[in-house]
Amino acid sequence: MDKIVAANWKMNKSISQSEKFVRKLKKVDVRNNVIIFPSFIALPAVSQILEKERCGAQDSFYESSGAHTGEVSPEMIKEVADYVIIGHSERRAKGETNEILNKKVKACSAAGLKIIFCVGEKEGEDSHAVVKKQIIEGLKGTDALTDFVIIAYEPVWAIGTGKTPETDEIMEAVKYIKSLYSCEVLYGGSVNGENAEEILKICDGVLVGSASLDFQSFLKIARS
Ligand code: 13P
């Protein structure tokens, strides 16, 4: 079965660099279900090249419109993309609480977006306790929306560090998350062309940061 291979480009790639990457991607065969999350500013251009169902935004606000300078609404995103990442640890670190994230999840699912909801512990924290609280509070009242929700398990200590949990630890975390919330579960944190194949065997997909920026290294993951 196809797995999800999601590329979170974070604050990288200009509009023209993003276009160049997805033009190349369109020309090659990949086995897995690839979804690209460019910057907001590059998203419309990327969406014109790839289909909407292969595009996502890295965040969304929870209101549809109004006096919210700098924010982008779920309805605006839905014009160009089918996916959105909510609750990435880099945004949680800037003060996004589970309560805010819960509003975002509800607003995005109401707009018809599929949500990749990120959870994960920091170094030294109890993984189960952290993940449970993030899921219970962040996904509160969304049990009827499980078709719209995908959870990405991203231990904060594994992001951008080259360190990953052992395979059986990822397997255990995926199983635990599925016991709390019935949905697909991805793994994210230092996924690369070398470890992707093994990780993809034990979860429903991967959320890739730095290794998704280079075309050849991303292609290797997408073909794993
Ligand atoms: P890295 O792949 O760079 O560790 O980043 C993971 C991530 O944060 C994806 O959302």
Image (spheres, rainbow, N blue to C red):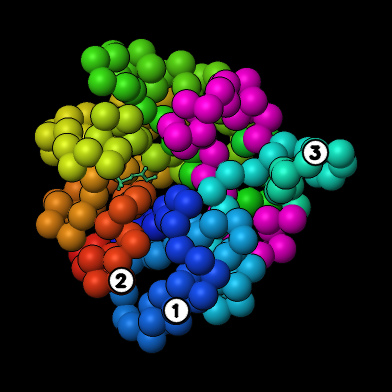
Q: Is residue 91 left or right of residue 206?
A: right
Q: Which numbered dot is residue 20?
A: 1
Q: Quadrant of the N terminus?
A: bottom left
- Magenta-tinted stretch: 76-104
Q: Circle 3 sits in a helix, a strand or a loop, which is it?
A: loop
| Residue where numbered disc 2 is placed | 215
Taking depth in this image into account, of 151 and 85 the one nearest to the observer is 85
Mark closer to the chain start, 2 or 1:
1
- Vertically, is 55 above or below 28? above
For label 3, the residue is 68
Q: Is residue 21 magenta?
A: no
Q: Amino acid at mark 3?
A: His
Q: Confirm whether the magenta stretch covers residue 87.
A: yes
Q: Is residue 125 above or below residue 214?
A: above
Q: Is residue 222 left or right of residue 148?
A: left
Q: Where's residue 39, x and y in %?
A: 54, 57
Answer yes or no: disc 1 within 8 Å of ligand 1: no
Q: Residue at x 34, y 51 (%)?
A: 209
Above or below residue 174? Residue 135 is above
Q: From where the camera sits, is residue 53 visible? A: no
Residue at 49 percent of width and 57 percent of height:
37
Residue 21 percent across, percent down from the top left: 41, 75
**Along the polypeptide, which appears first: circle 2 or circle 3?**
3
Mark 1 belongs to which amino acid?
A: Lys
Quick check: 188 above or below 101?
Answer: below
Question: Element under label 2?
Answer: helix
Residue 122 percent location from the top left of the image:
32, 22
Query: In the rendering, which numbered label is found on residue 157?
Result: none
Give how far apart the Cα atoms at labels 2 and 1 are: 10 Å
Residue 161 x, y percent position in the rendering: 22, 38
